[in-house]
Image (cartoon, rainbow, N blue to C red):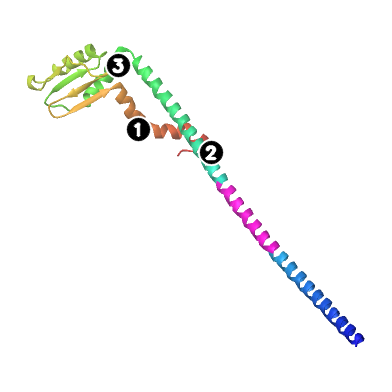
């Protein structure tokens, strides 16, 4: 009887050990599979993180490049504007240093550009009152009394040039306005000539 019990206990133990080994083996396989799956997931996460970081860096670099380009363009345009400004500052200085006969001719040309059949009034710039008075007197000597011009005692709000006005309209001819008009007209050509080959005209 005792022997039979011992045999049963031995069989139970062997079966239990076998089951334990099977469970351990299965658990080990499942654990290995879980570890492998976890490793793959972590690797995917790591790769996704790397891609995300690369994208972020690329966006950052693109922004940095765009900002640097915009800053370069601003400096480029500022340099071009400084050169153009310097050119017209020199032109202004040259005009102000014109001999009186040539400056008189400039004012005469401005007056001739105005089509005023019925006369009108001139407001001289502060430094041109005497010169403009001579030019107006010269013009009036060739016109009928009803179409003659008058010279106002009021002064234009600038030094060089004049304002011509009638009851219907007003025309300003000042050195500043004249230079600004020529600047608008000539700047594209100047930019092409000065900067086209060096920086490319934009």
Q: Give the mark toward the camera: 1 or 2.
A: 2
Apparent side of residue 133 relative to residue 49 in the rendered image (left or right): left
- In terms of sequence position, does the residue under pointer 1 or pointer 2 come before the other? 2
Q: Find out whether residue 84 is within the magenta segment.
A: no
Q: Are marks 1 and 2 in contact (CB under 8 Å)?
A: no
Please say whether residue 54 is one of the residues in the magenta stretch: yes
Query: Which SS type dominates the magenta stretch?
Result: helix
Which residue is at a point 44% across and 33% down the rendered structure image? Answer: 191
Q: Which residue is mark 2?
A: 68
Q: Check disc 3 and report the residue beneath it.
A: 103
Q: Quadrant of the N terminus?
A: bottom right
| Residue 8 position by quadrant | bottom right
Q: Which residues are magenta?
A: 38-59
- Whether residue 176 is visible, yes or no, is yes
- Give the image location of residue 134, x and y in percent: 20, 13
**Label 1 crowd bin: few (<14), some (14–19), many (20+), radius 10 Å:** few
- The residue lying toward the viewer, choosing from 27 and 29, is 27
Q: Is residue 54 above or below residue 95?
A: below
């Amino acid at each position: 009887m005792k022997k039979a019990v011992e045999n049963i206990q031995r069989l139970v133990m062997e079966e239990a050990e076998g089951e334990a080994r099977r469970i351990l083996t299965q658990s080990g396989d499942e654990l290995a599979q879980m570890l492998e799956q976890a490793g793959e997931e972590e690797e995917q996460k790591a790769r996704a993180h790397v891609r995300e970081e690369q994208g972020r860096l690329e966006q950052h670099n693109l922004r940095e490049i765009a900002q640097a380009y915009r800053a370069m363009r601003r400096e480029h345009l500022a340099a071009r504007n400084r050169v153009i400004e310097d050119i017209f500052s020199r032109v202004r200085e040259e005009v102000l240093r014109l001999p009186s006969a040539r400056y008189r001719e400039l004012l005469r040309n401005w007056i001739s550009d105005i089509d005023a059949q019925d006369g009108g009034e001139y407001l001289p710039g502060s430094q041109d009152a005497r010169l403009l008075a001579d030019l107006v007197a010269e013009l009036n000597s060739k016109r009928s009394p009803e179409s003659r011009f008058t010279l106002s005692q009021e002064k234009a709000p600038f030094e060089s040039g004049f304002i011509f006005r009638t009851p219907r309209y007003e025309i300003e001819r000042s050195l500043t306005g004249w230079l600004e008009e020529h600047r608008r007209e000539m700047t594209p050509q100047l930019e092409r000539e000065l900067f086209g080959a060096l920086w490319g005209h934009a």
